[in-house]
Amino acid sequence: MSRDLIPFHCNDVSALARALKGELAKFAQLPSHVELLNVLARASGHGNFQAMRAQWAARERMENPPPAAVEAPVDYVKVERLARYFDIAGRLVRWPAKHSERMTCLWVLWSRFEARAVLSGAEVGRVLEAWHLFGDRALLRRELCDQGMMKRTADGREYRRIERAPPAEAVALIRHLAARAAAAA
């Protein structure tokens, strides 16, 4: 069984000795291992040994955070190919034939909606109309809902963007389109 080493430190040895004497005087016989751990923890200013261990573990986590998550690899050839579906302003020119390409393009449209906003069906239609050129906003609205990127009420009056992280290639495409539009402006 592996044990975490918990360093024991006190600023004043004399105060520690007095606290230990007072704690040990409470026992009629020699304290057990667990009781002794609690005595030492209380003498050093903690409520009990578990509290002392929790403090040490929290300090370790804060001083030594886990390594940052590794970003998913991006297929930049695919991103470059998908960018051809959009004009210089970032509007979707045509609907891709491949499902995987459609999904990435839907993420771009998803990014055009304001986060945590409640939209009417007409407002969703206006946003989609502004960001695509092939004239089928109903298809796009339905796909966004079917793919779990937006949700709507049963009567279709309210729409909300579902907040979640897009895949790495979608993020790269969104950034590329934004940079391309800014450079053209």
Image (cartoon, rainbow, N blue to C red):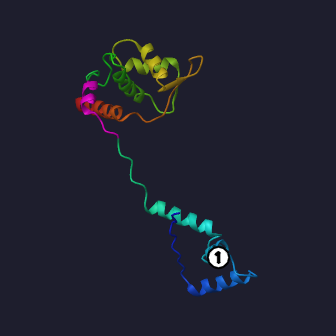
Q: Position of residue 135 (x, y in %)?
A: 37, 11
Q: Is residue 141 left or right of residue 32?
A: left
Left or right of 78 on screen, residue 99: right
Which residue is drawn at the image coordinates 60% and 83% (left, top)? Answer: 16
Q: Is residue 142 left or right of residue 85?
A: right
Instruction: Say if residue 185 shows up in the picture.
Output: no
Q: Is residue 82 magenta?
A: yes
Span highlighted in magenta in the image:
72-83
Is residue 89 shown in magenta? Answer: no
The residue tagged 1 is 36
Where residue 129 sits: x, y (%)?
Answer: 40, 17
Q: At which x and y percent is residue 87?
A: 27, 21
Vertical position of residue 77 compared to residue 53: above or below: above
> Mark 1 is on which residue type?
Leu
Residue farthest to the right, as pictured: 28
For residue 179, which quarter of the picture? top left
Q: Which secondary structure is most common in the magenta stretch?
A: helix
Which SS class for mark 1?
Answer: helix
Which residue of the protein is positioned furthest toward the top in this rendering? Answer: 135
